[in-house]
Amino acid sequence: MILMKNIIREGNDILRKESSDVKIPLSNEDKTTILEMLGYLFNSQNDAKAKELGLRPGVGLAAPQIGINKKIFTILANDLEGKTWLLAVINPNIIKKSKEIVYLPGGEGCLSVDRETCGITPRHKQITVEADLYNVQTGKTEHKKFSLNDYIAIVFQHEYDHLFGTLFVDTIMDEDKAKKSGMKPLWEE
Ligand code: ZN
């Protein structure tokens, strides 16, 4: 089980390395890693479990954050329409990005960043992605091309950045400045 003590924090070089491609079909070890990462997200979003285990809630977790420099990340998040997205993403490539830039009002957070941060992180409103997706129900991996918008696109870009050694704090900027330059908040606060 992944706990907060297993999460690599800002300042550790592991978070700054580019991760390696993962061999498909996935090894049993990689499958186990994916299930453990999703397990963290599930537990962290369950109030009782999170309290019991001392977990910070998360909607995404990338393998480097648990000390594994492989191109794998998981997402468990609800979009603005209330649809739940469960994604286990392997070897992703963002192949198209919208010109329109959006941001999460109030800024992003990260399980690897403990300090208070001030500012927003600019993200593309829409992205088109190619990746291998691991289906936890069938145990199979499928190569897919798909587009994401808004909140899930933001979460995806945050996790994707982890695979290349980038943290959300690297591109953080003042929210007023962002607004003035035409970037849009995902919702008005
Ligand atoms: Zn993060």
Image: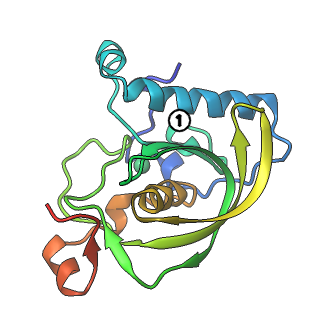
- Which residue shows up at 17% across the image and 59% down it? 118
- Which residue shows up at 32% across the image and 45% down it? 113
Image coordinates of residue 114 in percent, x first then y, are: 27, 41
Q: Nearer the viewer, residue 138 or 159?
A: 138
- Is residue 6 something one can see in this rendering? no
Compared with residue 128, is residue 32 higher up or lower down, i.e. above or below?
Answer: above
Check disc 1: other Cα within 10 Å, few if <14, some if 14-19, many if 20+. many
Looking at the image, the residue that sits furthest to the top is: 52
In the picture, residue 32 is in which quadrant?
top right
- Which residue shows up at 53% across the image and 18% down it? 1
* In-image side of 180 versus 35 (left or right): left
Q: Nearer the viewer, residue 129 or 137?
A: 137
* In-image side of 110 versus 8 (left or right): left
- Is residue 66 something one can see in this rendering? yes
The quarter of the rendered structure image containing the C terminus is bottom left
Compared with residue 106, is residue 73 higher up or lower down, i.e. above or below?
Answer: above
Which residue is denoted by mark 1 in the rendering? Answer: 66
Q: Nearer the viewer, residue 76 or 10?
A: 76
Image coordinates of residue 44 in percent, x first then y, are: 38, 27
Image coordinates of residue 181 in percent, x first then y, are: 23, 87
Q: Check disc 1 and give the amino acid type.
A: Ile
- Which residue shows up at 33% across the image and 72% down it? 102
Colour pattern? rainbow
Looking at the image, the residue that sits furthest to the right is: 25
Image coordinates of residue 20 in percent, x first then y, are: 70, 53
Local secondary structure at mark 1: helix
* In-image side of 177 versus 152 (left or right): left
